[in-house]
Image (cartoon, rainbow, N blue to C red):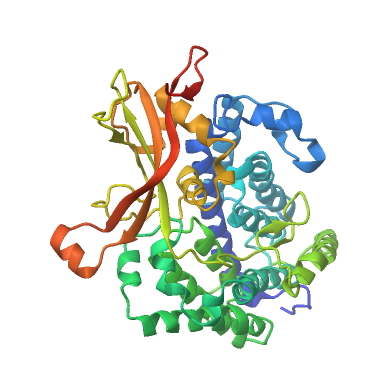
Amino acid sequence: MGWDWFSDPDYWASRLVFQRMLAAVYLIAFLVALNQFRALLGTRGLLPIPKFVARVPFRRAPSVFRWHYSDRFFAVVAGAGAVVSAALVAGVSDSAPVWVSLLVWALPWVLYQSIVNVGQIWYSFGWESLLLETGFLAIFLGPAGMAPPVPVLWLLLWLLFRVEFGAGMIKLRGDRCWRDLTCLYYHHETQPMPGPLSWYFHHLPKPLHKVEVLASHFTQLVVPFALFAPQPVAGIAAAIMIVTQLWLIVSGNFSWLNLLTITIAVSALDSHIMAFSRPDLTEPPRWYRIVVLVVAALVLALSYRPARNLVSRGQLMNYSFDRLHLVNTYGAFGSISRIRHEIVFEGTDDVELTPATAWSEYEFKGKPGNPHRRPRQVAPYHLRLDWMLWFVPLSFRYGESWLERLAEKLLTADHAMLKLMRHDPFNGERPTFVRAQLFRYRFTTRAERRATGDWWVRRPVEPALDARRLGADGAAVAAD
């Protein structure tokens, strides 16, 4: 069978693995939305969707929730996305006609787009846009009975290049510690959500930390250019990126960012690496070729500003230039925190506040709390509230629209909110007062860990939110 420039059967297996992995990421994303939306975005959530759509025009945030919103409808949308994603993981579209494959892969993209565009700060992370951009390209990859279209494969390479090279450039332009190779003296300890091995990574010898940074620079600033080389060079470049992303997975929790980057890199592996037998493949229909070429032209046109951003001194990271997140900029950790601060919420059921008042601590599922508790492996799941609470000590403007509201939810023992907690010290009952304290955290030394069994050492710094109680109108007010 002869093949023209449009299709390449050597990527049949990698396309199949890519689609399965992407569907799994979609499934995780929809389950996260289903589990967390009531507390964060529901009608009685911290930042309700109905209030958002009432003040923001459609052109700025297109979404199916423009036409109707209720908590039940959101659950239906997220649940439908999860069902379709699970079906795609199982390969239900593999033997479908081309037009059916297009429609089935478009469905989770439309549904998740609708969630992200009304998700406000809870959906402001770079991996949301990355999932949408990847998901858009996946619509046009075609079913398993047809050879993968080369234009879409090249667009996936372009996406992977921007993810890696953008992350490398923001580091070089950002914190000086990336240039003197010392950033990982701090990062494993101060990253948003350390994992179960982060303590050990932090205590690696400093020369190894410098090797880590050098390896990161090599992978992000040199290797991406090899993606556009002939095989097997391009596949080797993608494999290096996959190994680097696996390293990041075991050293911290970054939601599905690393898994999704690995997924994109898989699409660059041809039959030299993905040596699987394939069935007889059909030629793509003419209308499909035209659609793919139009989409490729659109993506290339929209790539102008993201490409210019890569070489700009004022480089933006994790920014979308279009409302549908079709072509975006990426990057992370242009600056590194040297000191870790955490906000700790506490409550009491005392009737009055006195110097002898005993305060009990709320525990979150992912962020550091009790110093004796080992950091958890959370990724690729995403604990949105925990992540945003990491940002607040960096600048309290991150929490100005919802931090007070969170205290109110704790005062009312809101069931949806307490589901996002690891431990409620009041077992579902209402506390009388709630406050938030700012603590300085650091990993224990090896000697401290042997002596105490603790993973963290912490000390109070200052109040983050003075004591609150419920007012007559049911809102949180300052304690007398």
Which x, y percent locates residue 96? 65, 52
Q: Could you say where residue 184 lies in the image, as x and y percent from the top left?
A: 44, 73
- On the image, which quarter does residue 425 sit in? top left
420 over 17 or under it: above or below? above
Q: Quadrant of the C terminus?
A: top left
The relative height of residue 172 versus residue 114 in the rendered view (above or below) is below
Q: Quadrant of residue 263?
A: bottom right
Q: Nearer the viewer, residue 369 or 476?
A: 476
Q: Is residue 274 visible?
A: no
Q: How many marks?
A: 0
Q: Residue at x 58, y 41 (%)?
A: 81
Where is residue 112 shown, x and y percent of the image?
A: 63, 44
Q: In the image, what residue occupies the spot 48% across and 43% down? A: 385
Q: Give the percent coordinates (x, y) of residue 164.
A: 61, 73
- In which quadrant is the N terminus drawn? bottom right
Quarter of the image for residue 303 reads bottom right
In percent of the image, x 58 and y 39: which residue is there? Answer: 400
Confirm whether residue 28 shows in the render.
Answer: yes
Instruction: Out of 226 and 198, give the one closest to the viewer.
Output: 198
**Left or right of residue 70: residue 463:** left
Residue occupying the far left of the picture: 451
Lateral position of residue 409 relative to residue 103, left or right: left
* Residue 224 or residue 101, whichever sits in front: 224
In the rendered image, the vertical position of residue 176 relative to residue 457, given as above or below: below
Q: Is residue 161 left or right of residue 212?
A: right
